[in-house]
Image (cartoon, rainbow, N blue to C red):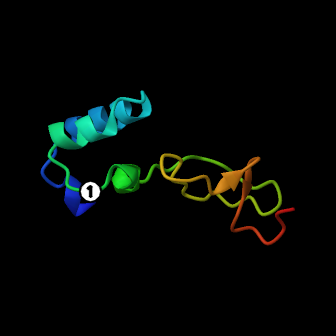
Amino acid sequence: MNKNLDHLTTDQIASLIERYYRNENVASLLTEYTIDVPASALFKLFPDQVIEARCPYCYLVAPETPLKDQRIKNGLSSLCAMRP
C-alpha cells in the first residue's frame, strides 16, 4: 500500500477509487481524504489489480494495473516477445 494512503481504511480506499473514476473533482477528493499529492498523481497511488489475461502466443498470465496504465493491449502481454 502506498504510504500516502496508509491512514485510510480499505473501504475508504475503495470509495476513493470509485469516486475518482466517476470523475469527481480530484482536488475535493484529496482534501476530503487528506492526501497530500498533486491531483495529477492521485491515480498512481491506487493499488494494483490482478486480472486474468493470457497472451495467445506464450499463454503468460500477467498482473496488470488497469487503474494505472494499460500493459496488456488487444489481449497480448507487453512482456511477450512474440507480441506483434
Image quadrant holding the C terminus, namely bottom right
- Pinpoint residue 52: horizontal percent, then vertical percent: 60, 47
- Pinpoint residue 23: horizontal percent, then vertical percent: 42, 30
- The answer to whether residue 57 is left or right of residue 11 is right
Along the viewing direction, whichever of 33 and 77 lies nearer the viewer = 33
Q: Is residue 46 visible?
A: no
Along the viewing direction, whichever of 46 and 22 lies nearer the viewer = 22
Q: Most extreme residue toward the right, as rendered?
A: 84
Disc tally is 1
Residue drawn 34% across and 50% down?
42
Q: What residue type is disc 1 on? A: Val
Kindly identify which residue carries mark 1.
37
Position of 72 relative to 10 (above/below): below
Residue drawn 29% across and 36% down?
16
Position of 29 relative to 62 (above/below): above
Residue 10 falls in which quadrant of the image? top left
- Pinpoint residue 12: horizontal percent, then vertical percent: 21, 37
Residue drawn 42% across and 27% down?
22
Along the viewing direction, whichever of 77 and 7 lies nearer the viewer = 7
Position of 14 relative to 7 (above/below): above
Dot 1: what SS?
Answer: loop
- Pinpoint residue 6: horizontal percent, then vertical percent: 17, 55
Answer few, some or many: residues within 10 Å of disc 1's Cα (few below 14, many 20 plus, some between 14 and 19). Answer: few
Image quadrant holding the N terminus, namely bottom left
Q: Is residue 43 visible?
A: yes
